[in-house]
Image (cartoon, rainbow, N blue to C red):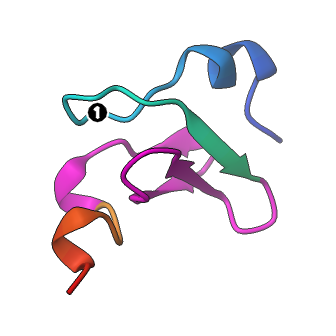
């Protein structure tokens, strides 16, 4: 099952900038359009926890 398109329209990065997220259905991830954090989608549920995100500002040298 894929994420509901209406849900994708309202999802945003949980960081203070609240930028929109891009969904990659093949990788089952959501990527912030501003900071680049990658959030996993597990069992069709987006895991929007900053502590569990990959990439982002802290990952850049």
Above or below, 55 relative to 15: below
Residue 47 sits inside the magenta stretch = yes
Q: Are there few (<14), some (14-19), or many (20+) residues within 10 Å of tag 1?
A: few
User: Which quadrant of the view contains residue 17?
Assistant: top left
Q: Quadrant of the C terminus?
A: bottom left
- The residue under the point 66% across, 17% down is 9
Left or right: residue 52 compared with residue 10: left
Above or below, 24 relative to 4: below
Using the image as rendered, state which of residue 47 and residue 31 is in the foreground: 31
- The residue under the point 50% across, 41% down is 46
Q: Quadrant of the N terminus?
A: top right
The residue lying furthest to the front in this view is: 61
What span is colored magenta in the figure? Answer: 25-52
Question: Would you name the residue on which mark 1 appears?
Answer: 14
Horizontal and vertical percent position of residue 60: 26, 79
Residue 29 sits inside the magenta stretch = yes
Horizontal and vertical percent position of residue 37: 39, 58
Left or right: residue 27 compared with residue 26: left
Above or below, 44 relative to 36: above
Horizontal and vertical percent position of residue 29: 60, 57
């Amino acid at each position: 099952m894929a994420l509901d398109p209406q849900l994708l329209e309202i999802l945003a990065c949980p960081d203070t900038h609240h930028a929109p997220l891009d969904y990659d259905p093949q990788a089952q991830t959501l990527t912030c359009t501003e900071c680049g954090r990658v959030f996993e989608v597990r069992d069709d549920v987006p895991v929007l926890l900053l502590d569990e995100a990959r990439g982002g500002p802290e990952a850049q040298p």
